[in-house]
Image (spheres, grey):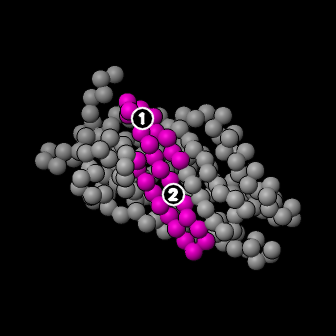
Amino acid sequence: MLQRSMLLLLFISLLVVSTAGPARAGDAVDGDRFLGTYGFSGGESEARSLRATVDALVDDFNPLLRGLARRRLKRTVRVPERIEIAMRDGAYRLTVVGAPDFPSDARYENGAMVLRQSSFEGTRETRFHLSDDGRRLLMRVATRSALLPDRLDYQLTFERRQVPIERDAFAGPPTPVDSGS
């Protein structure tokens, strides 16, 4: 049990490597809908739900390790303040303010912006779904590891805080799009 606990601590504290690569040219038009800045809008109910999810997972640990596991998970599993999605060097780049060690390269796949991370301890997939009107971004996170007593799955909601950026390869730098509001 002590080995498992030590591996858990190692798992939580390691940086995991993103397996996302540059966006494909065919994905650019749909993926560009995601470009912009989003602020957390899920309120206290989503923040409370995330805390409850972490607490439920921690309750499955050995009682002697629960405090340590809870502190480590709460330090790494947080509600981000803001998410910025941009196109740089032909790849979608995400900046997640308030989430430590978050990878930046993403892929556009089947209507979602996707980040996949893996290490020898487990995997984490973060999928971002944009509402039809382009104003709300849903972030779904799925973490799997043999070191955790169960899966860690949660979702958070964000609202667009800045007008989307239009990408025009012939006109130089991106320009804001008039959102009509």
| Residue drawn at point x = 40 percent, y = 47 percent | 112
Give the labeled residue for mark 2. Answer: 125
* Most frequent secondary structure within the magenta stretch: strand
Quadrant into which the N terminus falls: bottom right
Give the magenta part as a residue range: 112-140
Q: Tell me the element at label 1.
A: loop
Q: Tell me the element at label 2.
A: strand
Dividing the picture into quadrants, the one containing residue 50 is top right
Q: Is residue 39 left or right of residue 149?
A: left
Few, some or many residues within 10 Å of mark 2 (<14, 14–19, 20+):
some
Q: Which mark is residue 156?
A: none
Q: Amino acid at mark 1?
A: Ser
| Residue drawn at point x = 32 percent, y = 41 percent | 33
**Image position, residue 94 (x, y; %):** 42, 52
**Image position, residue 48 (x, y; %):** 69, 39
Q: Residue furthest top?
A: 181
Q: Is residue 36 visible?
A: yes
Q: Which mark is residue 131?
A: 1
Q: Residue furthest bottom?
A: 3
Q: Amino acid at mark 2?
A: Glu
